[in-house]
Amino acid sequence: STVNPLLQVNELSKGFMGIRAVDNFSFAVPHGTVVGIIGPNGAGKTTVFNLISKLYKPDNGRIYLGGQDITDFKPYQANQIGIARTFQNIRLLGNLTVLENVMVTLGTRATYTMVDVILHRRSFQKIEAERLQLANELLKRVGLLHRCNHKASALSYGEQRRLEIVRALATNPKILLMDEPVAGMNRSEKDDLAEFIKSIVSEGVSVLLIEHDMGFVMSICDTIIVLNYGKKIAEGSPALVRQNEEVIEAYLGKN
Ligand code: ATP
């Protein structure tokens, strides 16, 4: 529905041996928006991503996507229902080419292929040709098409981060979780990525991102949520959050 948020997280908690990494945290990502989570190191941001992508089970709280309770889903089910993510530490298949990295991810849609072949009487060749075209289009949009036959390990850091984003998008997500997307990127790469994120959002993908680069966060996010010791200490528009005393004290003041 367009009224309910795409992602709804209610009273989420997760502890590790006495540490409350995420503490009674509630928030939402409305359709067609970019929401940023900021906060000091160890605030619990990555743990929130691990909970939403179902790598961790929460101690408490519920997670809904499109109104469906996904709290007890496995990671592959979360991906199937439309949650994709990138990691702080890049995870690519370094010995495969750039194009192969994307094709492998598109290949995980094999079940859809069987449905297409059996129900819609479409040929494997046609489906493979479409996959190749989709991979090429995605790579073109992030400026990586000219690199498609290079090994992933030969790419620059910024290029590897963009390839990771393409791989996540290749799973056709409703929401993309990005963990520090501009870390290690230069100015022009950051600007290009901001434009790219805006374009995928306009095409219906919502974005939840963790980022330490305040300039980037402030320019791209509709809403910013500030975490500190696992708790939400502020939430609102970039302009509002920037002026929040508690936020300045806990986080922005240190920058
Ligand atoms: P950063 O900005 O440095 O990435 P963060 O906000 O993402 O930090 P988390 O990585 O979520 O913070 O960590 C929150 C707290 O939970 C930290 O104290 C961390 O040590 C702890 N923690 C996270 N994952 C685990 C784990 N698997 N086992 C034990 N403790 C963990």
Image: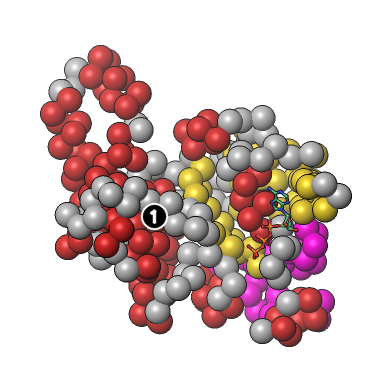
Q: Specify start and end residues of the magenta stretch as a single range.
A: 221-246
- Counting from the top left corner in percent of width and height, residue 124 is at 17, 25
**What amino acid type should be assigned to the residue bearing mark 1?**
Glu
Q: Let me know if residue 150 appears in the view.
A: yes
- Counting from the top left corner in percent of width and height, residue 80 is at 47, 33
- Counting from the top left corner in percent of width and height, residue 81 is at 50, 34
Callout 1: helix, strand or loop? helix
Mark 1 — residue?
164
- Counting from the top left corner in percent of width and height, residue 116 is at 26, 22
Q: Nearer the viewer, residue 8 or 112?
A: 112
Quarter of the image where one finds residue 8: top right
Query: Could you tell whether 94 is left or right of 49 in the image?
Result: left
- Residue 230 magenta-drawn? yes
Residue in view at x 78 percent, y 76 percent: 250
Residue in view at x 34 percent, y 31 percent: 109
**Where's ligand 1: which quadrant?**
bottom right
Residue in view at x 40 percent, y 79 percent: 186
